[in-house]
């Protein structure tokens, strides 16, 4: 037994000597920003990642041909130096920046963009973004395995990429700013295989340094980044598994810098009323509308008078108060930041009496029974209850089904849900263009089993109008196109397939030691924070 | 002994197959489609169908289960639909932290529960007994979420004695373990008390006292050893349940354990991860029970496995 004690003493002594002997190296001044999240970061593969948490992290590791001015919805060339649109609006020619390098040191060429887009379209990749690029000529044939390459993607020379579309699409340039079209190096994708999402190599302002599953992801500065002066810090640490309440305490103690999940609802009012903390909270608009879908193919919701009555029955001001005024009441489909938002449109004013009269006119003087589906995470059940109470006031008895997100999505996509509250379904626009609220959730094309048009609304006239509006692609036609979409959305509101409820605002709390340009903490595209622009204040 | 062990292991295999089959069936009758969760909302039906094919979800259920089991036998738990990494890596990366919290939690349960239970049994009916029982009841019924946040707020935020959640040093494990210990300790105190009260009334204890042994020797050498049997079964159960993850404590303290992983996987219908976690915890529960059973002969010579 004695030798154990001896061995222990030796080990302890050695450790002490080593600790005393190692020089106290002066810590190099590293500008580090720490962000907290509750959930794991799922993947950093730009072809796969599609949640609000990894969206802007991916944007900091990868780049696309286009991007947005930080903090705004202003689209600008990014890895493209310039671009040209053909007169028929079907061909885009991008001139690439020269000398942009991947994190492995290789220069980016036009071929890399072709590879990256074909990778997204390849079913083997299982990319949730494939649908955005099916309008590229030959994409559908490639996706179905009928062609070896996408004919509409051509690397004309080392620095020129030509993209040909099946038909003009005014939102095409926005899709070239989506994460799904960000450029990846083929050799690294092939080396990492299916693990590329955990070993990302891009061109972005940051490169991955360390990923400890379930604990943290650390990004470090890309010294060769093509934009001078970016990023503005040396390191970003994403801590995962941090409860939002604890994250707030840690921020108040100066241990972390940004609350990735936002301010916990229970502490929200207190923080905003405390002058010490209020100035560390940034508020901004986002491209969001919360709405209730009304299944237009089921009785009695197939009667437009009933749908209009329901629109008048819901007190949106009260619902906004329920969520601590974190939103503005909605009277239309498009959020205020979106081109095509109609400032003069008033919508259906809250008026339970008028709603009852309209219901009586439609043959339901005593109302009717229906079912309202909603997500079961806070605050959605509370919002759904408020809607239920409002409907009850005009005689409509809505049974509440609060369920897991996946179950609600399934019910909506199968057409089993008369009413669905959209909150908690991750519905936020992909890009700041009005057609992003039409094609995926209100078009005839999306009114299909497994789709996201849970109102099952389909208006052929509007479908044609939207197609026409999307062919207005030339510079200078933006105004005309926004006006077309204003008309389309006004007509949709006449048909009332939705009850728009509110447009959410984003509240981001950060430590006093970090700052940056206006709007980067509530960036409408780099959600929730534009990490490349965050700086440590001196 | 060997025969007993072999029998128990065979039983465990049957249980594991049953658990995997049941979980598999339950997950596939859920009204939620993993392919649609992967595909996201910009996907048209063709894309969803392609993803469903890639995930193998278009195959009939028995075929999918057979495929899963055949890979399982080769030690392959499959790949996460959402995170796109091996489930074994995801589970493995969290086992260390889970085991650490399990061990520390049980230590605190015993530290709090056993002395309290013994004191209450020895002074049955006294003020000490009543106090212990009320405290045990409070500890066992207080919501862990509130207790954890309270401990964090007072001891970490106000006094700065412990880190504000996270994982790494021994300081990190104290508060989550105390939170588990407060809840579990209450149960242990009650079980310890009732077991000891029963033993103290038995003839051999009276004999011991009659032949002049000190009360201390009677209690610790003779009575306690027998009364510990139910406590050992509880420890065995706790080994299993804690290894399956303690979702609430893990999320309050940011502890990277299996419970967090399970919770996230359930939200996203990440079927391979859910199956992996369920199988891991089933295995842990079986192992915990087996360990407890193997301990009995040491405490009570009358127990013997032929």
Image (tube, rainbow, N blue to C red):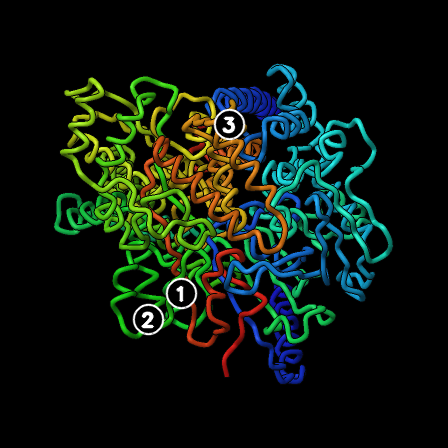
Position of A38 with respect to A208 (left or right) is left
Badge 2: chain ID: A
Same subunit, labels 1 and 3: the answer reads yes
Taking depth in this image into account, of A339 and A375 the one nearest to the observer is A339
Above or below for A462 versus A119: above
Secondary element type, mark 1: strand
Above or below for A279 versus B272: below
Taking depth in this image into account, of A522 and B265 the one nearest to the observer is A522
Query: In the rendered image, is residue B266 in sight?
Result: yes
Disc 1 from disc 3: Cα separation: 41 Å
Q: Which residue is mark 2?
A: A277
Residue furthest right in the image? A157
- Expressed as whole percent of the image width and height from the top left, the position of residue A230 reads 63, 72
Mark before the other along the chain sequence, 2 or 3: 2
- Expressed as whole percent of the image width and height from the top left, the position of residue B196 reads 28, 39
The quarter of the image holding the C terminus of chain B is: top right
Frontmost of labels 1 and 3 is 3
Badge 1: chain ID: A
Q: Residues within 10 Å of mark 3 (few under 14, many from 20)?
A: some
- Expressed as whole percent of the image width and height from the top left, the position of residue A87 reads 71, 47
* Residue contact between numbered discs 1 and 2, judged by CB atoms under 8 Å: yes
Q: Which residue is mark 3?
A: A444
Frontmost of labels 2 and 3 is 3
Q: Which residue is mark 1?
A: A509
Taking depth in this image into account, of B280 and A33 the one nearest to the observer is A33
Secondary element type, mark 2: helix
Disc 1 from disc 2: Cα separation: 9 Å
- The residue at 66%/69% (across/down) is A221
Secondary element type, mark 3: loop
Above or below for B269 versus A192: above
Above or below for B54 versus A185: above
The quarter of the image holding the N terminus of chain B is: top right
């Amino acid at each position: 037994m004695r030798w154990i004690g001896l061995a222990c003493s030796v080990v302890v002594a050695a450790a002490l000597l080593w600790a005393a002997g190692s020089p106290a190296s002066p810590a190099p001044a590293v500008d580090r920003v720490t962000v907290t999240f509750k959930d794991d970061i799922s993947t950093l593969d730009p072809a796969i990642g599609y949640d609000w948490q990894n969206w802007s992290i991916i944007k900091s590791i990868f780049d696309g041909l286009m991007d947005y001015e930080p903090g705004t919805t202003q689209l600008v060339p990014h890895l493209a130096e310039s671009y040209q649109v053909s007169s028929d609006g079907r061909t885009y020619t991008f001139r690439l920046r020269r000398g942009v390098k991947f994190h492995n040191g290789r220069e980016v060429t036009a071929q890399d963009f072709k590879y990256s887009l074909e990778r997204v379209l390849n079913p083997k990749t299982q990319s949730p973004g494939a649908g955005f690029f099916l309008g590229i000529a030959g994409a559908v044939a490639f996706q179905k395995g009928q062609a070896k390459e996408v004919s509409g993607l051509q690397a004309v020379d080392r620095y020129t990429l030509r993209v040909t579309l099946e038909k003009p699409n005014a939102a095409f340039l926005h899709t070239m700013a989506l994460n799904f079209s960000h450029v990846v190096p083929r050799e690294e994708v092939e080396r990492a295989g299916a693990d590329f999402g955990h070993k990302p190599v891009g061109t972005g302002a940051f490169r991955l340094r360390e990923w400890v599953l379930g604990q943290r992801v650390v990004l470090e500065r890309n010294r060769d980044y093509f934009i001078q002066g970016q990023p503005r810090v040396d390191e970003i640490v994403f801590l995962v598994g941090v409860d939002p309440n604890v994250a707030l305490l840690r921020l108040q103690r100066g241990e972390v810098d940004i609350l990735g999940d936002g301010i916990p609802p229970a502490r929200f009012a207190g923080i905003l009323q405390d002058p010490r903390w209020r100035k560390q909270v940034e508020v901004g608009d986002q491209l969001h509308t919360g709405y209730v879908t009304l299944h237009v193919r089921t009785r009695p919701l197939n009667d437009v008078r009933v749908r209009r009555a329901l629109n008048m029955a819901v007190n949106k001001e009260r619902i906004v108060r329920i969520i601590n005024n974190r939103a503005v009441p909605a009277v239309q489909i498009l959020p205020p930041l979106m081109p095509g938002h109609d400032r003069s449109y008033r919508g259906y004013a809250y008026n339970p009496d008028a709603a009852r009269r309209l219901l009586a006119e439609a043959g339901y003087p005593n109302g009717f029974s229906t079912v309202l589906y909603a997500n079961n995470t806070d605050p959605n059940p509370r919002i759904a209850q408020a809607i239920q109470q409002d409907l009850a006031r005009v005689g409509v008895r809505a049974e509440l089904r609060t369920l897991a997100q996946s179950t609600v999505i399934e019910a909506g996509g199968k057409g089993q849900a008369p009413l669905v509250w959209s909150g908690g379904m991750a519905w936020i626009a992909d890009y700041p263009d009005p057609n992003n609220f039409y094609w995926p959730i209100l078009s005839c094309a999306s009114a299909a089993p497994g789709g996201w048009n849970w109102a099952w609304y389909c208006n052929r006239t509007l479908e044609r109008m939207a197609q026409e509006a999307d062919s207005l692609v030339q510079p200078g036609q933006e105004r005309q196109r926004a006006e077309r979409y204003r008309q389309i959305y006004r007509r949709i509101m006449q048909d009332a397939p939705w009850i728009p409820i509110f447009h959410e605002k984003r509240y981001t709390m950060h430590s006093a030691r970090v700052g940056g340009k206006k709007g980067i903490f509530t960036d409408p595209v780099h959600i929730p924070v534009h990490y490349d622009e965050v700086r440590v204040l001196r | 002994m060997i025969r007993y062990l072999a029998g128990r292991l065979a039983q465990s295999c049957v249980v594991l197959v049953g658990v995997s089959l049941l979980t598999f069936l339950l997950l596939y009758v859920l009204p939620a489609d993993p392919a649609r969760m992967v595909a996201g909302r910009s996907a048209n039906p063709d894309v969803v169908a392609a993803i469903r094919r890639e995930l193998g979800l278009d195959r009939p259920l028995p075929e999918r289960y057979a495929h899963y089991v055949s890979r399982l036998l080769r030690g392959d738990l499959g790949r996460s639909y959402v995170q796109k990494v091996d489930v074994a890596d995801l589970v493995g990366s969290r086992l260390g932290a889970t085991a650490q919290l399990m061990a520390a939690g049980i230590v605190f349960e015993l530290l709090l529960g056993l002395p309290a239970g013994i004191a209450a049994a020895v002074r049955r009916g006294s003020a000490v007994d009543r106090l212990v029982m009320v405290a045990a009841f409070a500890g066992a019924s207080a919501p862990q979420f509130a207790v954890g946040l309270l401990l964090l707020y007072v001891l970490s935020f106000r006094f700065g004695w412990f880190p504000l959640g996270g994982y790494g040093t021994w300081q990190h494990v104290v508060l989550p373990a105390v939170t588990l210990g407060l809840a579990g300790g209450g149960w242990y105190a009650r079980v310890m008390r009732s077991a000891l009260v029963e033993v103290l009334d038995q003839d051999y204890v009276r004999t011991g006292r009659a032949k002049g042994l000190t009360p201390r020797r009677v209690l610790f050498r003779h009575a306690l050893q027998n009364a510990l049997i139910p406590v050992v079964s509880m420890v065995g159960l706790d080994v299993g349940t804690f290894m399956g993850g303690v979702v609430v404590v893990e999320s309050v303290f940011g502890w990277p354990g299996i419970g967090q992983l399970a919770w996230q996987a359930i939200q996203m219908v990440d079927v391979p991860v859910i199956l992996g976690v369920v199988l891991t915890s089933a295995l842990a529960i079986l192992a915990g029970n087996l360990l407890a059973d193997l301990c009995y002969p040491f405490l009570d010579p009358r127990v013997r496995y032929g």
